[in-house]
Every structure is written in structure tokens, then in C-alpha cells.
Amino acid sequence: MPISHDAEISRLLTDYRHGNKAVDTIEAAFVAIEEAEDPGIFISLVDREDALSAARELGGRIDPTKPLYGVPFAVKDNIDVAGMPTTAACPDYAYTPTASAPVVDRLIEAGAILIGKTNLDQFATGLVGTRTPYPVPRNALDPALVPGGSSSGSGTAVARGLVSFALGTDTAGSGRVPAALNNVVGLKPSCGALSTRGVVPACRSLDCVSVFAGTVADAWLAFSVAAGFDRADPYSRPIPVGRPTLPPSVRIGVPDDASRIFGSATAAAAFDAALSLFPRIGPAPRPVDLAPFFETAALLYEGAWVAERYQAIRDFVEASPDSIHPVTRRIIEGARSRSAADAFAGFYQLAELKRATADVWSHVDVLVVPSIPDVCTLADVEADPIGANSRLGTYASFVNLLDLCALAVPGPFRGDGRPAGVTLIAPAGRDGLLAAVGAAMHCAAEVRIGANGFRVPAVAPQPAEAPPASIEVAVVGAHLSGMSLNHELASRGGVFVRKTTTEQHYRLYALPGGPPPRPGLMRTNQVGSAIEIEVWALPRESFGDFVSGIPSPLGIGTVKLADGTAVKGFLCEPAAIDGARDISDFGGWRAYLDSLR
């Protein structure tokens, strides 16, 4: 039984505007938990009366200053909540914090109501969801499958409709694998976008707080509320959140033939079916050699980063080794055979692999991979606990090591009726692009949400306006979406706003030199041409850094648009047109490049 007719946040808020009460939603959540009869999902629940009291304190009318007004959520039990034990799925390790993790505080301040703390693979070490001394959560769709880990309880709680969203953590895929196995969305943000203060570390330098939700829009809303720079967290970064926008062109990358690793033809067919749903907004998908990505993934459990897991709970491991799950202990104690020299060798190897993979992002905006190479059953884990776990991380474990963001999205179900999905990956700071592409794909898949049978709602078009505290910039050449320098905008938190044209007083030139080939835009005093441009919005704090990298003869000036407005944009010096070709009649840089092909 789900908490409401639909746990989707926008519909809950609509119900509240029409007179429904948050206290009734929270009461329904506790009833649904009782009726679910799955003792493995939650390790502890908020006192029922305390949760109902928090709902009453919101007042009887929806508060526009609280974007998560009356929305029930859950938290993985390696994230601190004041007054509730943090166990990390190890009862002997448990402690009761006096303060909540900042991400939890932000959500509660926005009106969300905490329901409870969820089960996990002990110390967030695992992708199967079965490495826990508590009852193992049941997969929401198929009891023969593992629930996925390490955020097993968070993924299944959302899939069963017990809460609208849940926080997990993600170091090697723990925010994406449970999403794939339970038919929900798993948002793994850019490292540092969400504070990890108040989180029991797995690998402190790689850990992310993640979000599970039924839809991309719900995951994005929770993420945008929880995000923010935390000066007290040394791994926090001021990453602009922006908003999901779908630019006119997105370059998709997919695994090449050698990188298509599947356990069955059924899994391969499901991936191909998902690929067919991506919006046709760019060139044909480009095959990508994932060999260096897979080599990176191997470092996480075969290299120095196992020592980081050991260091995170070193005192406890040495004092109470028998309190640790046997498989978890076997993995973490493997760090004892590693030396400091091994650690530095791992750092050097990772630096080489970052360089080897960096070129992909000059040709690809979004890499699309299977979330998992195949489903995993409880019997598979029983037969081979380490190998089964490792296979689930095939397409996931390299992401944080390479400082990438990711979004797991459900796709069409497999031929055998089991869930399947894909993960979208991009460099840090491009979370909004992943959300826009993922939302379009999820809607096109025409699948139900989780295990409850509610349809994914249509994607509402975004308004053509810049986010607050941003500066609009008109781009005309290699910074256009899908082109070679667009990453210079995206990596600084730039978001696409609209496609339009200049007023009819401009000339466009193909400038000599390169690579890359560059156009020059100039305003004339006579009637010229309307030139196609894209308007992007950069955070104010990123604008100066972006402009400082623009080489002569280009610069930033004021560009007048066809609608009579003006924005900052690329212009070129008059001397630059000597020897340049006037390409104004093409109407824009894309059309000119198409003519050369």
C-alpha cells in the first residue's frame, strides 16, 4: 500500500493545495510500513507521534517557502539524525548523535517529514544489499532478486511507495544499483555538491550523499534543496545546482562493442531498447572505449582505496573485529596487506587514468551505460558473494574516482519481466543536463514507478528564463550545445536558456586559424542578417573566470536579440575579419558547418 494515491511530490503538494492534510499523509506512511510486512527496510523509525506532531506544526495551509511541505522521506542509517542511533548496520558500532547531518537539516527546514532510517550493506561496503545483520530488505519487484546495496532500504522504501524520496550514499554505485534493481531513479550528484558531514565514511574522499525517488523531477527537487556549500566539510565544493534544461544538441556516448559487458542476451536487449528512447537532439551516439574506465573501477577494491575504508573505522575494526559482518570484514581487513607505497602507486595510476579518460568529454556530453550488466539473485550471492557484488559495479564503480556525476533511470522492462535501466554519466557540475536528458528518457520508457503501478508523468517544458543570480551569455560558435567548447560553460554550472537569433544588424565570419574553427560575430550600422545563437546562463561567480579564458580576437560585448532584448555575448574585433569568409547567408554556425560536410 503506498502512502497516498501517488507518492510523487508534485501530486502530494497539489493534494495539499486542495485541502488534504500533511498529518494524514504521514499517518498513511506509518500504516503502509506496517502493511508492507518487510522488516528489513527500516532499522529504526521516528516516533510516530513525533512525526505527526512535525506535520501538524507545518500548519493547515501549504507554505510556499517550504518546497517539500509535508513530504515524507527516509534516511540511510549511516547518515546522522539527532536523537536517533546511527548504526551503519552494525549494532555494536551504534552511537546517538546530538546533531543531524546538514543535508537532513536542509530537507526538514524545507518542510519534509522524516519517517525513519533505512537498512544498508554494513558500513556501506557492498552493492548487493544482503551484507547486514538485520533482516535483508526484499526486492520490491521480484523477491528472488537482491535489493541492491549498499542503500538497500532507501531504494526499496521508495519503490514500495512508503516515502516520496530517500537519502542514500554512493561511493561505488550504492545510489544507483538499488535504483536499477527496484525500478526507481537514483541521483548520484557531483562529489561535494551535498555535504557529507555527519555521514559515517566509507571512502571519505569519494563518498556522496545520493537521492532515490520515483521520478527525476522528485529526485532533482530533493537534491536542489539539500545541496549547498558546507565550509565545515573539507570535501564540500561550491557547485552551482542550476536547473534541468535540454539544449538543442546533446552528444551521446555509448559503450563500444568491446565494452558491452552483459550477463545475458536479455540484459543486452533491454539496454538496446532503452537507447532507442533517447531524445533525437544531436548526432548519432558515439561508441566509447570503456577499458580505461573499467581499469579505474578496479582500483576501488583492488587498490589503495580499500585502505581508506579501513581507516574510516580503524579503531572499531581493531577493537571489535567479531562485530563486523564476515564478508565486510574480509574486504576491509584486506587493507592490512597494503603499504603507503601501494597507496601512492594507486594515486599515480588514477592520475594517468583521469588523463586517459578526459578526452572522451571533448566528444561526448553524456555517456549512457547499463546501470548493471544483469540482474543478480539471492542465489547468485549465496554462491559467490564477492564475484556477484563485483559484477554489479561494472558500470558504476569508476564514477566517483573520475569525479563524474551520474543518474540512474529506469528503462523498459526486460523480456523476462524484470526491471532494467540505464545510467547517464557526465563530468562534475553537469547534473542539470543529466536530469533533463534522464527525465525525457524516463517518460518515453512508459514504465510504472517502482512497484506501485503509478505512471511516470509527462515532462513539463522548462520556462525560457535564467536561474537566479546568473548572467546570460549569447554563444554563436564552438560553445554551442553539442560542440567542442560547450564544456567550458557546462563545467562552470552554465545552463541552456533558449535558442534565438540576433536582430538583423549582424554579420558572421568564419575566422582563419584554429583548431577549433571559430566564427566571429560583428554588428554593423547597416541592415545585416539575423544570426542564430544560443543563450546560456552562467552563475555570477563563474562569469569572470569564463571570460578571462576567451582568446583574442574574440571578446564579450553586448548582443542585441531579435526580441529587442540585449545580453552579453561573443563578438570579435574588426581587424579579425581580414581574410575571413563572410558566412552570414547561412544564418548561423551550425548551418555553415553542415555545408562543409
Image: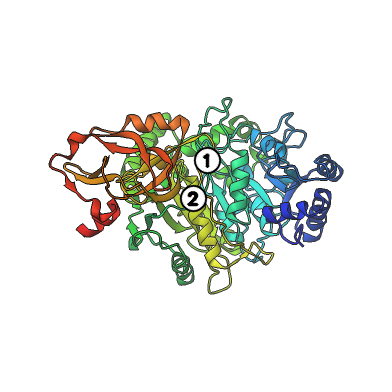
Residue named by callout 2 = 245
Where does residue 393 sit, x and y in percent of width and height? 49, 53
Who's the residue at 39% across and 29% down the image? 544
How many neighbours does mark 1 have within 10 angstroms: few (below 14), some (14-19), or many (20 or more)? some
| Res. 478 visible in picture | yes
Q: Secondary structure at mark 1?
A: loop
Residue 409 image-quadrant placement? bottom right
Residue named by callout 1 = 467
Residue 162 relative to residue 169: left or right: right
Q: Secondary structure at mark 2?
A: loop
Between 7 and 31, the one nearer to me in the picture? 7
Where, quadrant-wise, is the C terminus in this rendering?
bottom left
How many neighbours does mark 2 have within 10 angstroms: few (below 14), some (14-19), or many (20 or more)? many
Residue 174 relative to residue 502: left or right: right
Seen from this angle, which residue lies furthest front? 526
Q: Earlier in the sequence, mark 1 or mark 2?
A: 2
Q: Give the vertical position of 447 relative to 179 (above or below).
A: below
How many numbered marks, from 0 up? Answer: 2
Where does residue 466 sit, x and y in percent of width and height? 50, 42
